[in-house]
Every structure is written in structure tokens, then in C-alpha cells.
Image (tube, grey):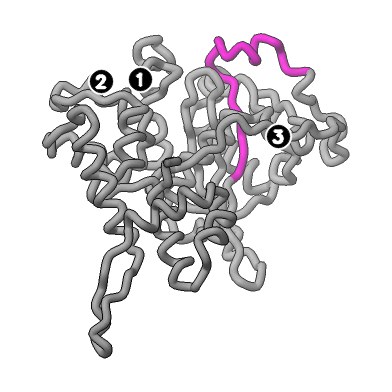
């Protein structure tokens, strides 16, 4: 029988209560009708009607899930995690409270001597999907669509930034991600209310370094070009004129109006290159780390509800997050090894 996911069992239970027939449920879930019939048979229990005292067969998703787990234990090999409560709690805490992905957990466990049972990424995913954890299921994961390729969009210049340098003019060594100091820059905005009005003008100015994936977050009042320019000047004061030029060798931005004061920003000692419109993949590192921010500040949130300290803490959390590309090291650990300022 084709494996049904946990949330599909509850969908079956709900649809049956709404008087859908098994073949109709199969069509809705894109499953073969025999799979649905077998699943209903497995999860059906007999309940006694309190008024008529008649026995009534009722499908219960929780019963089916329990039977699946019991069946898996009986027919399968002994699970590696066994009764290792400490490891189970470790994984639950990492996903529920620290927003780690299973891959990040597997890398962190590898170097954590306090964890006795080491698990690979695939095993952690399997345990989650098969209900091994009491407080954790697949709904707690931050999903990404794999193998999806966006349609090619026409590449054209932006008439907002006439005279600015495009990404095609960016030095080839920047593309290689070998030299530290080349950043992608973007803003994460507040959500809209039910009327479609922005909840607030507050947003986050996000900077992502291309080689080491270092993250800098700054909460700003709005997306006006003057506000972004003011924040850039604060960064220059923070690092000093020479330090600013060494840390921020270049920026790659989209064509948002917030970066239209590019001439003034370049006078601070750096160079800005603009992506093609509708080509967010040209700032791929930015986009990936914006998803990490959204683990703590979901889409639709009002950025004004979050303090400067918390937004800065998210950046530090990202900088300490285990990376597959760095062999399980975080950005901070990788920078320390390679003596990057």
C-alpha cells in the first residue's frame, strides 16, 4: 500500500465525516482508491451510540497512526534511536525552539560528544514522518520545494536605475565566492492587514556576504532611499572609513526604490551592482537567508512588533547555524578558521 503521510490520515477522517465516499477521497488526495479503502479498514474502530446503543464503525486517524507505528516496530529492524530520550528531546528542541532543519541537526550532532546516538539527515526525516516523536511532526518543518525551476524571465534593464552598474558588469571573481567582502542586500517588509494595507512601514535591511554567508540585520523605519542611506552611513561610522571599504567591497541589490540613492552609497567607499528585474536568483544567498529570518518572523508579521535586539539576535543565530557547504561548521566557525574579519 502506498505510504500515506500523517496529515493525509486526518484529511481522510475529516472527509469521511463530511460524507465523502472513498473514491472521492482518493481523487482529492491523488491516491489510488484501493489505498484509501485499505487505510479506512485499518483505522476503523467500533463505537457505541449513546442513545441507540448500536455499534457504529468510525474511522479514526489516531488509531491508524498508532497501528502503523506498532506494525513498523514489529516488522522492521530495531530503530537506532531506541529509548534514547536525550536524543529525542535534543532533536525536538532544535526544531521547535531553535528552528533548525534536520540537516543542520545532523551536522551539529556529529560534533556534539554529549549526544550518544548520531543520526543522519535522512533518518531524522524518516523518524519525523513516521511519528517517532511525541511533540514533533512534519508540520513543524520549514519546507522547500526541491527540483523546482522557475521559468526564465526576460532580462531587461531597470529604468529606475539608469546609469547604475548592472550585475553583468560585476567582476567575475565575485561570482566565484572566493573573496570575502561582496554582499547581497535586500529588505524584509511588514505584512498587510485584512484590508490590504501595510501593517507598518518598518522593515529589516538585510546584508548577506556571498563567500562566508555572514549575516547583518538592521531594523529601519521604512524603505525610503534616505532611510537606507542613513543606515549605510551608520555602518561606515561603526567600522570606520577603511574598515567599511574592506568589509563591504561591493553590494548586489534588486531594483527596489530603497536602493535608488546608489550614487550616495557608492561615495561611502563601495560599489553597487543591480540585478535584472524579476531575477531574485541573482541574489540567491539573500533569498535563502531571508527564509531563515522567516523562521522567527513569519510572513505577514508586523516588523514593528520586534525589537532591534531581537532582529540583531536573528542575524547572530544565522551566523551560528551549521552549514552543509562548510562541512557542518557555522559561518562564525568557518570565518575563525580562515581568519576572516
Q: Position of residue 121 (x, y in %)?
A: 35, 27
Label 3 vs label 1, nearer the camera: 3
Q: Residues within 10 Å of mark 1 (few under 14, many from 20)?
A: many
Which image quadrant for residue 192?
bottom right
Q: Which of 322 and 244 is in front in this view?
A: 322
Q: Where is residue 171 in the image (x, y as percent from the top left)?
A: 71, 13
Label 2 vs label 1, nearer the camera: 2
Whichever of callouts 3 and 1 sits on the residue coming sooner in the sequence is: 3
Q: Where is residue 220 in the image (x, y as percent from the top left)?
A: 55, 50
Q: Position of residue 234 (x, y in %)?
A: 54, 38
185 left or right, relative to 271: left
Q: Residue 150 carries which label?
A: 3
Check residue 71 for magenta coloring.
Answer: no
Q: Residues within 10 Å of mark 3 (few under 14, many from 20)?
A: few
Q: In this view, does 48 lie above or below 168?
A: below
Please indicate, yes or no, whether residue 82 appears anywhere in the rendered image. yes
Q: Which of 151 and 335 is in front in this view?
A: 151
Q: Which mark is residue 110?
A: 2
Q: Is mark 3 on a helix, strand or loop?
A: loop
Please indicate, yes or no, whether residue 202 appears anywhere in the rendered image. no
Q: What element carries label 2?
A: helix
Q: Tell me where the magenta segment starts and ends, as one range.
A: 169-187
Q: What element carries label 1?
A: loop
The structure residue drawn at horizontal position 45% and vertical position 18%, both measured from the top left corner, is 325
The structure residue drawn at horizontal position 48% and vertical position 49%, both measured from the top left corner, is 34
Which residue in the protein does label 1 denote? 328
Amino acid at each position: 500500500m502506498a505510504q500515506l503521510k500523517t496529515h493525509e490520515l486526518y484529511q481522510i477522517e475529516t472527509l469521511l465525516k463530511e460524507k465523502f465516499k472513498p473514491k472521492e477521497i482518493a481523487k482529492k488526495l491523488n491516491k489510488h482508491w484501493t489505498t484509501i479503502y485499505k487505510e479506512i479498514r485499518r483505522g476503523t474502530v467500533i463505537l457505541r451510540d449513546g442513545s441507540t446503543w448500536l455499534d457504529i464503525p468510525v474511522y479514526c486517524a489516531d488509531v491508524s497512526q498508532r497501528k502503523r507505528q506498532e506494525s513498523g516496530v514489529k516488522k522492521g529492524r530495531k530503530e537506532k534511536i531506541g529509548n534514547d530520550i536525550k536524543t529525542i528531546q535534543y532533536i525536538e528542541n532544535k526544531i521547535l525552539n531553535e528552528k533548525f532543519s534536520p540537516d543542520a541537526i545532523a551536522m551539529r550532532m556529529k560534533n556534539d560528544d554529549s549526544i550518544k546516538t548520531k543520526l543522519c539527515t535522512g533518518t531524522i526525516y524518516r523518524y519525523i514522518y513516521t511519528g517517532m516523536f511525541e511533540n514533533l511532526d512534519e508540520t513543524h518543518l520549514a519546507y522547500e520545494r526541491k527540483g523546482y525551476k522557475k521559468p526564465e524571465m526576460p532580462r531587461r534593464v531597470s529604468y529606475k536605475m539608469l546609469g547604475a552598474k548592472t550585475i553583468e558588469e560585476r567582476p567575475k571573481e565575485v561570482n566565484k565566492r572566493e573573496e570575502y567582502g561582496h554582499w547581497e542586500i535586500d529588505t524584509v517588509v511588514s505584512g498587510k492587514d485584512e484590508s490590504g494595507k501595510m501593517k507598518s512601514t518598518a522593515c529589516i535591511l538585510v546584508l548577506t556576504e556571498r563567500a562566508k554567508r555572514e549575516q547583518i540585520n538592521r531594523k529601519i523605519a521604512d524603505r525610503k532611499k534616505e532611510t537606507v542611506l542613513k543606515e549605510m552611513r551608520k555602518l561606515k561610522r561603526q567600522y570606520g572609513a577603511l574598515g567599511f571599504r574592506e568589509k563591504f567591497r561591493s553590494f548586489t541589490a534588486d531594483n527596489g526604490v530603497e536602493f535608488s540613492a546608489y550614487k550616495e552609497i557608492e561615495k561611502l567607499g563601495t560599489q553597487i551592482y543591480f540585478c535584472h528585474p524579476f531575477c531574485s536568483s541573482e541574489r540567491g544567498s539573500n533569498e535563502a537567508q531571508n527564509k531563515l529570518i522567516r523562521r522567527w518572523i513569519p510572513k505577514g508579521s508586523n516588523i514593528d512588533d520586534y525589537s532591534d535586539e531581537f532582529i540583531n539576535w536573528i542575524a547572530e543565530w544565522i551566523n551560528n547555524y551549521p552549514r552543509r557547504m562548510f562541512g557542518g561548521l557555522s559561518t562564525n566557525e568557518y570565518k575563525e578558521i580562515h581568519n576572516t574579519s
